[in-house]
Amino acid sequence: MARTRRTFTPEFKLQMVRLFENGKSKSDIIREYDLTPSALDKWIKNHQNSGSFNVVDNLTDEEKELRKLRKENQQLKM
């Protein structure tokens, strides 16, 4: 059975990260809140790297440059 895509607020994500930081195991958090392991891992990584769950805040310099160049290229095509 396919899982429907859910969205989570930044507050919820932060709460899950804090549970992990305070010693609760990833498997317990995943099971209790019905999360995917990859989602929790991503939230923890993003919070540790930038303190933000916003995709733009967590891009590497190369990814930011690539986005900028693609946008520039699109404008030049117009």
Image (tube, grey):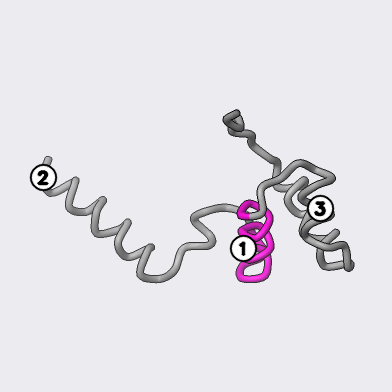
The residue at the far front in this view is 1
**Could you tell me how far apart the alpha carbons at marks 1 and 2 are, in whole angstroms?**
34 Å
**Could you tell me how far apart the alpha carbons at marks 3 and 1 are, in whole angstroms?**
17 Å
Q: Is residue 45 magenta?
A: yes
Tag 3 secondary structure: helix
- Residue 46's tag is 1
Q: Nearer the viewer, mark 1 or mark 2?
A: 1
* Mark 1 closeness class: few <14, some 14–19, many ≥20 residues within 10 Å: some
The quarter of the picture where the N terminus appears is top right
Q: From the viewer's perspective, tell me whether residue 6 is left or right of residue 14.
A: left
Q: Earlier in the sequence, mark 1 or mark 2?
A: 1
**Could you tell me how far apart the alpha carbons at marks 2 and 3 are, in whole angstroms?**
48 Å
Quadrant in the picture for residue 43: bottom right
Q: Label 2 amino acid?
A: Lys
Quadrant in the picture for residue 23: bottom right
Q: Label 3 amino acid?
A: Ile
- Residue 77's tag is 2
Q: Label 1 amino acid?
A: Asn
Residue 24: x and y, percent?
Answer: 87, 62
Residue 61: x and y, percent?
Answer: 40, 71
Region rendered in magenta: 38-52
Question: Residue at point 67% right, 70% down?
Answer: 48
Residue tagged by mark 3? 29
Residue 66: x and y, percent?
Answer: 30, 61
